[in-house]
Structures are given as structure tokens and as C-alpha cells.
Image: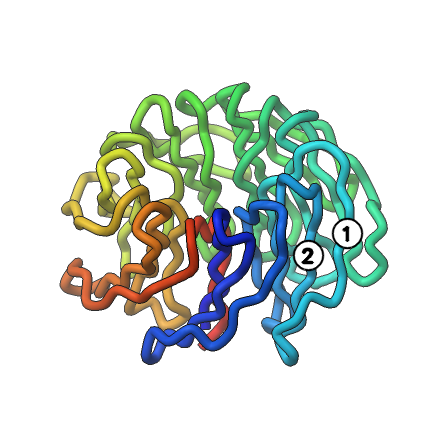
Amino acid sequence: MAFVTNQSGNDVSVIDLDNGKTLKTIPVGGKPAAVAVGPKGAHIYVVSPDSKTLSVIARDTLTVTKKIILEGGPFGVAVHPDGRRVYVTDWYNARVFEVAPDTGQVLRIIKVGNSPAGIAVTPDGSRVLSADRDSDQVSIIDTDSGERIATVPVGERPFGMTIDATGTRAYTANVATNTVTVIDIANARVIGQLEVQERPYAVALSGGHGFVTNQYADTVSVFDLKTLQPVGTIDVGEYPEGIIPSTDGRRIYVANWFSNTLSVIDVQTLRVTSEYETGDGPRAFGAFLLAE
């Protein structure tokens, strides 16, 4: 099941990935962009920048149960593995909110670089990484202390932030340099960089490959995770942004912002096998998939 944020439609499409049908459309308002499904899929978190809200959607009822106001410019969102902490980037104020979703309380405010966009949490919950777009860097945060412990220079205008299943490597898509930077998280250093196509926004990992949405090219670039060499390019819809693998790793789902579609890519053949309709202006920036 996919929870696709539709920025122009001010809602979230709940899509059955077995047949591509929209099960429900959930109004949230405020031009929603980022989304994150919580541990065990009990709750889904959606950020609406225009209304400065973090909406909490209950999986069992598919309704909004809470709206949390976050002053500033809330944008990216990620959930701690314990489910008790949600991290939201503040685009306007160079900071990250640590929020308790049960109470709506802001637990901590953590300073990062300018215009933080994408954000991700390591699988063990020990680190949070934010892509600080206008500082051309990634901030690494210790979740115990709530302090930024390192910054890593990357390409220009980093946006999407992805961490591998082992929690050792991070990948950021650099919009202005058309590159992806690979980071060794433990040592806070760049260990690789590769060129992709025009205006990369987000990265997904599956089957030994990395998949990158290129907004201006209407494509997904594919590269080998070991060698960082290009493998191929896949045509998708217009202005692709959000991208995520299926839980079994056999498919990649791509939200096409200007086409109002969700492309389905076969990881083995590297071909689009299906295309599902969404709402108006799907971005699905973040972890938008519920475990199948």
C-alpha cells in the first residue's frame, strides 16, 4: 500500500499496489509534500508546508487523527525506529524538529545547515541525517544527545536523503550538480560520487543498484552500488520525485509530479511494468510505502 502526497490536490492517495486502485483519498491541506510511514505501519506522517502542519494518519481508519503545528517551514520528515520520535526539517530556519507524535510536543530543536530538505534515520536509530540544501552539506545528528556531531560537504543543492539497510552508507541527490554523493556515516566522509541526469531529487536502493529520480530529464538513473558505475536509464513520467523500493525489493515505485502517476519498475529487467493514477501533483517525498 502506498501513501502518495498530492501537493496540488491537498490530499493523500492511498493506493493498492496489487492492482493500482486508489482505496481512499485523505484530505490534509497545506500543499503536502513529504511523507513517512512509521514502524509497523500503524501511523503515517505527512508534512504540509503551507499550513505548517504535521498530519498523523491512522492506518486502521485511514483518517487524520491529529495535526501538529510546527512554526517555520516544515518540509522533510522521517520516523525513529522506536516510533516515539518524528524528525521534521525546517526549511526556513536551518533546524530540525524532534517531535513526540503521541502528544504533539516538540522535544528538541536541533540546528543544522541552511534550507534542510530530505531527512533520514539510521536503522538502529542512533543517527539522523539531513540534506542541507543551501549549505551544500549533510548534517549528522546524534539522537541520544540531540546534537549535530558532524557535517559532510557534498554536491550543490542536496535534496533527497537515503540510508542503506546496514546504516553505514548514506546517499544524497545533488540537484544543482547532477550528482549523487555517497557518505560513510561512521566516519562522516565522502567515499564516492557519480554523475546522473538533470536535476536529481531522490535515491532508492534495491537489488544491488541505486535508483535516482531526475526531474528535468523525466528519467530514473540506475547505478551499481559497489562500483558506482552507471547501469542504465529508465524513462518514467514527467517530473519524477519520490522513489522507494517494495519491501521484497523486486519493484521500485516512482511518483511523477507533473503526470499524476506512479510508475512501477521491475528491478531485474529495469523496465516500467505498470503506471498507476494518483491525485493531482504527486510528490511522495520520503518513505511512502507501507510494508506489503
Q: Amino acid at mark 2?
A: Ser
Residue that label 2 marks: 55
Work out which quarter of the rendered image holds the N terminus and state it: bottom left
Measured along the vertical axis of the image, is residue 189 above or below residue 232?
above
Residue at image coords 33%, 67%? 249
The quarter of the displayed image where residue 169 is located: top left
Please tell me how crowded label 1 is: few (under 14), some (14-19), or many (20+) other residues with Cα within 10 Å.
some
Q: Secondary structure at mark 1?
A: strand
Q: Is residue 28 left or right of residue 118?
A: right
Tell me, for residue 68, which label it has, or none.
1
Work out which quarter of the rendered image holds the C terminus and state it: bottom left
Q: Is residue 94 left or right of residue 283?
A: right
Q: Position of residue 281 (x, y in %)?
A: 42, 49
Report whether residue 120 is seen: yes
Q: Report, in whole angstroms, how far the alpha carbon at label 2 lies from the one at label 1.
A: 6 Å
Q: Position of residue 176 (x, y in %)?
A: 36, 22
Q: Are marks 2 and 1 in contact (CB under 8 Å)?
A: yes
Measured along the vertical axis of the image, is residue 6 above or below residue 249?
above
Count of number-bearing discs: 2
Report whether residue 223 is seen: no
Q: Position of residue 173 (x, y in %)?
A: 39, 35
Q: Position of residue 27 (x, y in %)?
A: 60, 61
In this picture the colour scheme is rainbow
Q: Is residue 245 left or right of residue 70?
A: left
Q: Name the one closer to the observer, 280 or 118.
A: 280
Residue at image coords 46%, 53%? 284
Tell me, for residue 19, which label it has, or none.
none
Please tell me how crowded label 2 is: few (under 14), some (14-19), or many (20+) other residues with Cα within 10 Å.
many
Q: Secondary structure at mark 2?
A: strand
Q: Name the one closer to the observer, 166 or 83.
A: 83
